[in-house]
Image (tube, grey):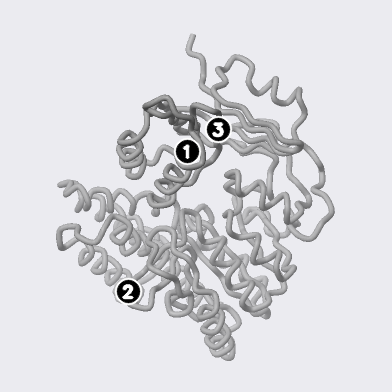
Amino acid sequence: MKIFKFGGASVKDAESVKNVASILSLYKKEQLIVVVSAMGKMTNALEKVVHAYYNQDPELKTYIDEIRNFHFKIVDDLGFPENHPLRHELENCFVEIDWACEEPPSRGYGFSYDQIVSQGELMSTKIISAYLMNSDIANAWLDVRDVLQTDNTYREAKVNWELTEQLIKTRIPQLHASNNIIVTQGFIGGTSENFTTTLGREGSDYTAAIFSYCLDAKEMIVWKDVPGVLSADPRYSQDSVKLDQVSYHDAIELTYYGATVIHPKTIKPLENKHIPLRVCSFKSPKEKGTSVGNFQATKPLVPCFIYKPAQLLISISAKDFSFIAEASLHKIFGLFAELKIKINLMQNSAISFSVCVDNDPFKIPELLHELQKDFRVLYNEDLMLITVRHYYPSTIEQLIKGKKVLLEQRSRQTAQVVLKEIKS
């Protein structure tokens, strides 16, 4: 059995959906689970809906209509007739969104976020499953919330591994008895109260890894718009090269520091059962891509760059004459944990504690407000955090040339710098 994962870029329009069908047609005789993300930039569009709902923005209906028009245009472009059941199923998804936005917000932003944004994955998989059927590729559509069970930590749900494994091992063989291909959603799960949760942004890779682990998959393949794992994001670097193989350890390090080609939680479940991962291009499906597995070393061994823009560097110091010691750090880390804010880089001195974080417009204001009750807080915005794995000293020198370095850390294999562009 193999687990495939298709991201938003691979299903962004009708032609992309046809390409997915073309790839799957090559594997009709194999047992597959196909995990699919929301189409194109629909997660971003649905986040706008959540924000508008939460702030009672009069543009709310306009945002929902834009999402509706986007999906139904794809349905039209794929040639579905007016009376096809798919159209009714999609309308039901919009009924769910309307219901979620009907009452004033009362259960917290995270809860509303998960109930609304999850509809992106449900709609994309309904469209793809129906199109595969029309293309003589038999498949079963699975609501992943029936098998992937989580707690109710909305926007960053924790998987109930024991129950999830039990449900997956029961349900998947039943579906595979009549269909080789199962189409399901990434990124989302369900609670014991039948509410929807999400696994964290870009969490579809993690979903595929969960299925791989629970079913002892032969291989997991992530289909991307790049030829494999690159040494740098091509949006920021013209000199990136494709890595032919990446060790589990390097993959964990790269994703932890923010490499977006694979979700950070993806690798560990695969490593625990020695399940190989391949990152392949959906534009060139017969190319080998990048293999991630139990390798001694990454090849070629070149510096790998991870760019994280829109960073906030916060400096926290005591209001009196005391040091930032264990008691202060305990309180500070407690706040970060309570607000579910990930620290991308931290550095401690006797009188201050500095952290670099994503500038989340919903979480950061509350964090700053709470910190300022007990500490003196300064911060810099619009920064770039660059992490370099397998760096050379000359690599860093070139990287910081013409920029202001606000914070820098180096270990034997990894260097991190927080930079600000110097405006002329």
Q: Are marks 3 and 2 in contact (CB under 8 Å)?
A: no
Q: Nearer the viewer, mark 1 or mark 2?
A: 1
Mark closest to the chain's N terminus, 3 or 2: 2
- On the question of residue 423 being in view, the answer is yes
What residue sits 57% from the left and 47% below the top? Answer: 260
Q: Nearer the viewer, residue 76 or 384?
A: 384
Which of marks 3 and 1 precedes in the sequence?
Answer: 3
Residue occupying the point 49% across, 26% down: 351
User: Residue 149: where, in percent of width, then height?
Assistant: 45, 75
**Rendering quarter of residue 38:** bottom left
Amino acid type at image mark 1 = Val
Which residue, given by chain and number where applicable, does mark 3 sit on?
348
- Judge depth for marks 3 and 2 and give the one in front: 3
From the image, state whether disc 1 or disc 3 is nearer to you. 3
Left or right of 195? Residue 227 is right
Q: As drawn, which residue projects farthest toward the front?
A: 321
